[in-house]
């Protein structure tokens, strides 16, 4: 089911046919960065448990219109407090794209679509974004979208940045 669209992208619920490109993306060590590549069985289990069930708000399958291929997942998911309580009218933006689609402005396009959707259609007041402090490309995307740095943290093995964007 189509949920949202941009110039080059379709955002929809995950489908069983997305399993292969999902596993291919998640098995790419460069895509995984500092995180380990998980065994295929674990990837399949995660896909079926986490990505196939439809959610009211969550990351959607991202499809590149030009070739009709699943290229990752993008979207807004509920923002939660440290205690796990959902924060009303706030969400977190995330984008995970397969490496062959990096450097093409796709993350910026996807982010723009979801920021607009979040404020216009969902009535959000604030959108958060967090990323690995060494992910310069994601930092550039978030800053292009107008997000402002809020805080950083972590330790010598994994450092992160948090950003936020307030409703216009």
Image: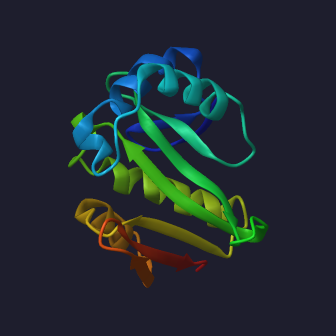
Seen in the picture, residue 103 relative to 81 is either above or below; the reply is above
In-front residue for pair 114/156: 156
In-front residue for pair 164/160: 160
**Residue 69 visible:** no
Based on the displayed image, in which of its 4 quarters is residue 9 positioned?
A: top left
Q: Position of residue 80 (x, y in %)?
A: 70, 66
**Residue 104 visible:** yes
Q: Quadrant of the C terminus?
A: bottom right
> Horizontally, is 69 left or right of 121 in the view?
left
Based on the displayed image, in which of its 4 quarters is residue 7 positioned?
A: top left
> Horizontally, is 127 left or right of 54 in the view?
left
Residue visible at 42% across and 17% down in the picture: 20
Q: Position of residue 56 (x, y in %)?
A: 75, 45
Residue visible at 68% across and 72% down in the picture: 82
Seen in the picture, residue 32 relative to 140 is either above or below; the reply is above
> Horizontally, is 134 left or right of 14 in the view?
left
Q: Position of residue 23 (x, y in %)?
A: 41, 24
Coloring scheme of the render?
rainbow
In-front residue for pair 53/127: 53
Seen in the picture, residue 119 relative to 56 is either above or below; the reply is below
């Amino acid at each position: 089911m189509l949920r949202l669209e941009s110039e080059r992208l379709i955002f929809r619920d995950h489908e069983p046919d997305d399993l292969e490109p999902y596993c291919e993306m998640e098995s790419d060590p460069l895509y995984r960065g500092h995180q380990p590549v998980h065994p295929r069985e674990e990837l399949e289990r995660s896909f079926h448990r986490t990505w196939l069930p439809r959610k009211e708000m969550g990351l959607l399958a991202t499809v590149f219109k030009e070739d009709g291929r699943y290229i990752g997942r993008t979207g807004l998911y509920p923002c939660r407090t440290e205690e796990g309580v959902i924060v009303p009218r706030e969400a977190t933006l995330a984008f995970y794209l397969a490496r062959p689609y990096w450097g093409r402005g796709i993350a910026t396009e996807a982010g723009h679509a979801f920021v607009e959707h979040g404020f216009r259609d969902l009535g959000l007041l604030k959108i958060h974004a967090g990323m690995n402090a060494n992910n310069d490309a994601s930092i550039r995307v978030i800053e292009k979208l107008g997000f402002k740095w809020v805080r950083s943290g972590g330790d010598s093995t994994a450092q992160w940045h948090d950003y936020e964007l307030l409703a216009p």
